[in-house]
Amino acid sequence: MKYWNSTLKKMDEYIPGEQPKDIAAYIKLNTNENPFPPSSLVFEKITSALNDNIRRYPDSLAMPVREIFAKQNNLTVDNIFIGNGSDEIFTLIFRGFIEKKGLAAFPYPSYSLYDTLAQGNGISFEKVPLDNNFRLDMNRFLEKKYDMVIIANPNNPTGTSVPVGEIKNFLSRYEGLLVVDEAYVDFYGETSLDLVKKHDNIIVTRSFSKSYSLAGMRIGMAIACPEIIRGFLKIKDSYNIDTLAIEAAAAALEDEKTFNYNIRMLISNKEYLEETLEAMGFEIVPSKANFLFLKHPGIPSGELYEKLKDHKILIRHFSGPVQSDYVRISVGTMMEIKQLFSALKSILPAE
Ligand code: PMP
């Protein structure tokens, strides 16, 4: 640690969900990845881009992705920035869009990377607890002068969401910068995209890791007013998105049919998962995402996580107040869900 600066020494590191080496031996329901493969157009485009031109730098502005998304959402390319996963976008937000002496706020429980990145950039922050039903009251962010507020909508790990009307109402009274992380919005949620056209203090972020099945390609997006997008372009790494990722993201956006089909399958699997787990006695938080946050009165959540791991099924168990009482289970394929049920039958106490 001799060469670590004082910020690095003080910060907590982000703990990602396990990605085991022998991944094929596991049923992976721990990191909210899409259980279905991406569009075949993605494979075609990546394969044809793997040629001699790979020795050239990529398009530093990721224009094809911005153009398609702009067209599909009635925006302009000046409203869109492409990042190396939405995680990179949060890094850039903490680097460029809040002063060092500023104060940020996030809900708790939520995506803990916000805390890590704030700490890593020396930004102070406060956590505003969700209520007993894991609902977020946006008014809590008006109780103090926060320079930046980040919410995930739908929220991770709870799956709960804030109606866009409440976000709109909040923006009319808030002068700081609001970031709405829409990593899970495609599964059920209402989007805040339209608010970008009317307000210069909102950034909506999107991820290609969940609904587009491209977690391994690392592509995310920020949608905001042109001035904010100019700021992202100024502060980003020179070539932050590689050639293959640009091809993959553009192809995934283009193939709307596969996208819509996968979302429908996932939602139907989720409904089946939810109904069956409820019948097994689980208490489930109503979720608008591709995962469930739940607990069972017959077994502590930490023990459930360990026992499922013994059955080669990975789910997520977080440490920390309130959330450690629960586990988070991502929606898988029908076969994965059925294997989960059969493992649970042997783990849960007999009624
Ligand atoms: N936001 C939330 C709420 C998430 O749960 C995740 C995934 N862990 C991300 C963002 C990160 O997405 P990406 O893979 O695009 O960096």
Image (spheres, rainbow, N blue to C red):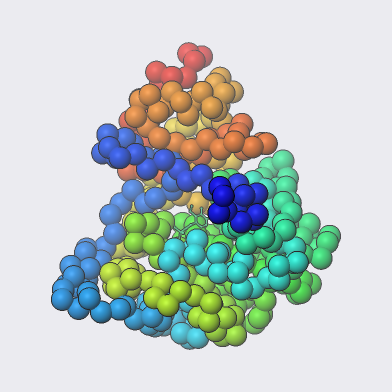
**In the displayed structure, would residue 347 be above or below residue 339?**
above
Quadrant location of residue 250?
Answer: bottom left
Q: Position of residue 39 (x, y in %)?
A: 26, 63
Quadrant location of residue 41?
Answer: bottom left
Q: Position of residue 124 (x, y in %)?
A: 72, 58
**In the displayed structure, would residue 128 be above or below residue 121?**
above
Q: Nearer the viewer, residue 136 or 5?
A: 5
Q: Which residue lies most toward the front here?
A: 2
Q: Nearer the viewer, residue 86 or 135?
A: 86
- Point 48% across, 38% down: residue: 316
Quadrant location of residue 332?
Answer: top left
Q: Is residue 281 visible?
A: no
Q: Is residue 90 visible?
A: yes
- Point 53% across, 81% down: residue: 234
**In the displayed structure, would residue 275 be above or below residue 50?**
above
Q: Position of residue 2 (x, y in %)?
A: 56, 49
